[in-house]
C-alpha cells in the first residue's frame, strides 16, 4: 500500500501465513456459521482510500477490524489481547515483510463480522503498534484468510458495502470477469503479466494499499524493468522495512484489461515479501464489485465505476502520526520533499495552515495531490518548508 513515500503491507507482509513453528501441530480451521440474512450488505469504511475497516466482535467485544486477504490467519494486537484478557500459548516466530517477529497463538476465540461467525478460531497475537503508527490508526484486529475460507466475501467498492455469505446456491455475478484463484504458500493468488512478459502469480493482498509489488528475482534480470526510471522508497511492515524502488510500469495485463502507466514497487531485498512473483494490492480493485470465492478457487470482478484509476504519491516522504504532529520517518532522496529540504526527524504540526489533530486522516492525503501543487508544511520549530508535488518516478 502506498503510504507517504513507502509501501506498508499489513499481512502477507505481516504473517504470510507462514508461521515458523516447526514441530507444532497444524492450526485447526475455525467453525463458520452464518446468520439468516448474512448476504445482506453492510457498510464498510475505506480508511484513507486503502484499508477496509469492518465492524465486528472478538469474544463478544465490539472491535473494528481491518480486512486482509493477505493475512494467512486472523491477527490480534498484543496490547489489545491483554486488554480483553486473551491469552496466548507458547511463543513462536512469525515471518514478516522483512524479517521475523515474536508471536503467540490463542485458541477458542469467537469472532463475528457482518453475518459471519467464526467459532473455535485460532488467532495470532503480535505487536501491531509499529504498523499502526505508520498507517495512522489503531489496529486491534486484522481479519485474515479465515473469513475468506469460510465462504463468499463480496466487496462493492463504489458503494462501500461488504457481505459475508455461505457458498450454498452461489451463482457468479452476471457480467463479471472470472479469475482463477490459486494458492501461493497458503495465500490466495491471481495471474497477471508485466511489461509483456510471461504470466506470474501475484498474492491477492487487501492489506497492500498500493497497486503491485514485484519480487527482486522477477525484475532484476529484465532490462525493461531494471532500467525503468525509479526513485528510492521503502517497503515493509511487520518485521521491519527495507529499501525498494518506486517505478511506473508501462503495461500490466490483468483480468482481461491492459493497464498503462501503473505505479508499482520493485523490492531491492531478495528476502522481502514477495520473494517471488508479485503482490497485488487494493488499488487494483477499487473500481470494481469484487466477489472472492476462496474455496471455489475464483475471484469475480463486476463493473463498478470504470477501469482502475491509480492514485499517485508525489512527495517522497513517509510520516508517522503522533497525536498533534506528523513525525517524518523517511524522505526519498529522489523526491520533491528532499528537494525542498524536509528531513527525517522533522515534526510537522500544520499543513497549509491546518493544524494536525485527531481529525487529520479525515482529509485527503496531501502527498497525493496534483502535480505542481505547492504544499506548505509548518514544522515544530516554527519554520515552514514548501513541497511542490511532482511525478518524480
Image (cartoon, rainbow, N blue to C red):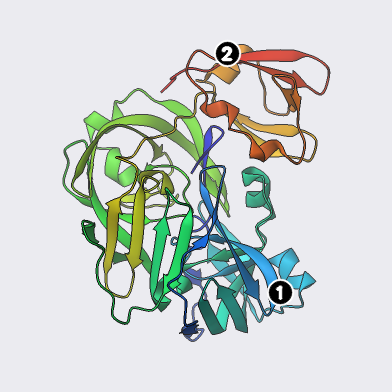
In the rendered image, is residue 25 in sight? yes
246, above or below 301, in the image: above
Foreground label between 1 and 2: 1
* Quarter of the rendering containing residue 231: top left
Q: Is residue 308 above or below residue 53?
A: above
Q: Residues within 10 Å of mark 1 (few under 14, many from 20)?
A: few
Asked whether 131 or 35 is in front, the reply is 35
Pinpoint residue 273: horizontal percent, then vertical percent: 43, 52
Left or right of 375 in this view: 38: left
- Residue that appears at 53% across and 50% down: 51
Of residues 350 and 251, the one nearer the viewer is 350
Task: Say whether disc 1 or disc 2 marks the residue closer to the N-terminus.
Answer: 1
Query: Is residue 17 something that shows in the picture?
Result: no
Distance in Å between CA atoms under marks 1 and 2: 48 Å
Residue placed under numbered mark 2 in the picture: 339
As drawn, the label of residue 61 is 1
State which quarter of the image contains the C terminus.
top left
Q: Secondary structure at mark 2?
A: helix
**Picture coordinates of residue 324, whole percent (x, y):** 80, 35
Image location (x, y in percent) of residue 233:
50, 32
Q: Residue at x 67, y 67 (%)?
A: 63
Label 2 crowd (10 A; few <14 / some 14-19 / many >=20): some
Specify the farthest residue to the right: 381
Q: Residue at x 21, y 35 (%)?
A: 195
Using the image, determine if residue 127 lies above or below residue 147: above
Amino acid at each position: 500500500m502506498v503510504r507517504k513515500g513507502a509501501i506498508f503491507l499489513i499481512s502477507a507482509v505481516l504473517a504470510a501465513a507462514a508461521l515458523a513453528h516447526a514441530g507444532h501441530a497444524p492450526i485447526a480451521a475455525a467453525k463458520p456459521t452464518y446468520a439468516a440474512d448474512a448476504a445482506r450488505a453492510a457498510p464498510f469504511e475505506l480508511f484513507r482510500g486503502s484499508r477496509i475497516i469492518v465492524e465486528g466482535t472478538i469474544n463478544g467485544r465490539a472491535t473494528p477490524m481491518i480486512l486482509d486477504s493477505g493475512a494467512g490467519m486472523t491477527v490480534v494486537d498484543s496490547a489489545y489481547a491483554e486488554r480483553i484478557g486473551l491469552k496466548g500459548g507458547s511463543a513462536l516466530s512469525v515471518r514478516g515483510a522483512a524479517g521475523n517477529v515474536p508471536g503467540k497463538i490463542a485458541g477458542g476465540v469467537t469472532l463475528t463480522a457482518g453475518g459471519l461467525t467464526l467459532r473455535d478460531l485460532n488467532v495470532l497475537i503480535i505487536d501491531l503498534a509499529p504498523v499502526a503508527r505508520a498507517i495512522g490508526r489503531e489496529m486491534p484486529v486484522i481479519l485474515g484468510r479465515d473469513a475468506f475460507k469460510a465462504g463468499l466475501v463480496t466487496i462493492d467498492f463504489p458503494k462501500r458495502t461488504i457481505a459475508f455469505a455461505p457458498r450454498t446456491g452461489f451463482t457468479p455475478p452476471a457480467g463479471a470477469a472470472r479469475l482463477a484463484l490459486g494458492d501461493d504458500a497458503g495465500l490466495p493468488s491471481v495471474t497477471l503479466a508485466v511489461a509483456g512478459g510471461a504470466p506470474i502469480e501475484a498474492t491477492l493482498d487487501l492489506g497492500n494499499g498500493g497497486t503491485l509489488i514485484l519480487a527482486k528475482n522477477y525484475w532484476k534480470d529484465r532490462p525493461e524493468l531494471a532500467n525503468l526510471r525509479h526513485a528510492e522508497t521503502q517497503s515493509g511492515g511487520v518485521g521491519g522495512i527495507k529499501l525498494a524502488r518506486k517505478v511506473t510500469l508501462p503495461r500490466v495485463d490483468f483480468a482481461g484489461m491492459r493497464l498503462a502507466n501503473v505505479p508499482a514497487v520493485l523490492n531491492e531485498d531478495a528476502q522481502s515479501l514477495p520473494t517471488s512473483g508479485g503482490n497485488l494490492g487494493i488499488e487494483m480493485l477499487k473500481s470494481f464489485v469484487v466477489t472472492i470465492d476462496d474455496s471455489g478457487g475464483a475471484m469475480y470482478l463486476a463493473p463498478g465505476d470504470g477501469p482502475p484509476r491509480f492514485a499517485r504519491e508525489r512527495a517522497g516522504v513517509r510520516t508517522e502520526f503522533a497525536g498533534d504532529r506528523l513525525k517524518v520517518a523517511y524522505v526519498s532522496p529522489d523526491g520533491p520533499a528532499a528537494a525542498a529540504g524536509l528531513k527525517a526527524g522533522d515534526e510537522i504540526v500544520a499543513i497549509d495552515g491546518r493544524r494536525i489533530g485527531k481529525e487529520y486522516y479525515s482529509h485527503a492525503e496531501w502527498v497525493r495531490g496534483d502535480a505542481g501543487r505547492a504544499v506548505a508544511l509548518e514544522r515544530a520549530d516554527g519554520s515552514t518548508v514548501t513541497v511542490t508535488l511532482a511525478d518524480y518516478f
